[in-house]
């Protein structure tokens, strides 16, 4: 008799940052101009996913960090991973999304540029970037293995 092991699936919606160190899969879908930052610490088996909606940092008038903004999402993602036991040097980052799905404007490019700038300022270079184009994306991060799967539009699921 085969035993099936099910992992807890956690959806990360727009403007959310979720981090866990359990046997789980973090999942973000409908990434149009938004960008998902998938971060994984394979040494400590800690992972996080941020679903970024806007470039820059939250306005000074907001009382706390707002993860819909690139700078705030990155700060929250890294801080939460550190609280779970990660060291920044052990965190590997992959980026997904940033498509121009509406065919006009450049918010997607602004989000990508903002994220890359904030990561660079923290000494983090993304391992993979599946960005741009004009098709939405979906991404999943398996915390235990660090495996990342993604698809573009309705195409087949790919593994990094």
Image (cartoon, helix red, strand yellow):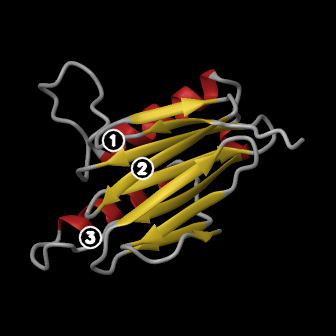
- The residue lying at 38 percent from left, 39 percent from top is 73
The dot on residue 109 is 3
Viewport quadrant of the C terminus: bottom right
Between discs 3 and 1, the one toward the N terminus: 1
- Residue 143 percent across, percent down from the top left: 67, 41
The residue labelled by disc 1 is: 13
**Is 146 or 77 nearer to us in this picture?**
146
Question: Does residue 45 appear to the left or right of 72 in the view shown?
Answer: right
Badge 3 marks a residue whose secondary structure is: helix
Cβ–Cβ below 8 Å for labels 1 and 2?
yes
Sequence-wise, the earlier of marks 1 and 2 is 1
First in residue order: circle 3 vs circle 2 = 2
Q: Left of 19 or right of it: where is 17?
A: left
Give the spatial CA distance, label 1 vs label 2.
6 Å
- Residue at left 54%, top 32%? 19
Q: At 35% from the left edge and 36% from the top edge, which residue is drawn?
A: 16
Callout 3 touching callout 1 (CB < 8 Å): no
- Residue 38 location, x and y as percent? 53, 51
> Disc 3 to disc 1, how far (Cα)?
20 Å
State the SS at label 1: loop
Q: Residue furthest front?
A: 1
Residue 43 in percent (x, y) is at 81, 40
């Amino acid at each position: 008799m085969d035993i099936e092991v099910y992992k807890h699936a956690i959806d990360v919606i727009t403007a959310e940052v979720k981090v866990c160190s359990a046997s789980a899969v973090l999942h973000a879908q409908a990434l149009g101009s938004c960008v998902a930052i998938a971060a994984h610490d394979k040494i400590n088996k800690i992972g996080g996913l941020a679903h970024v909606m806007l470039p820059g940092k939250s306005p000074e008038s907001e009382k706390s960090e707002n993860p819909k903004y690139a700078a705030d999402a990155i700060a929250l993602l890294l801080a939460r991973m550190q609280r779970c036991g990660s060291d920044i040097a052990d965190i590997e980052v992959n980026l997904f999304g940033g498509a121009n799905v509406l065919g006009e404007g450049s918010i997607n490019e602004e989000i990508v540029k903002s994220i890359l700038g904030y990561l660079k300022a923290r000494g983090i270079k993304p391992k993979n970037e599946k960005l741009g184009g004009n098709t939405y994306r979906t991404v999943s991060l398996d915390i235990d293995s660090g495996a990342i799967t993604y698809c573009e539009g309705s195409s087949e699921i790919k593994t990094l």
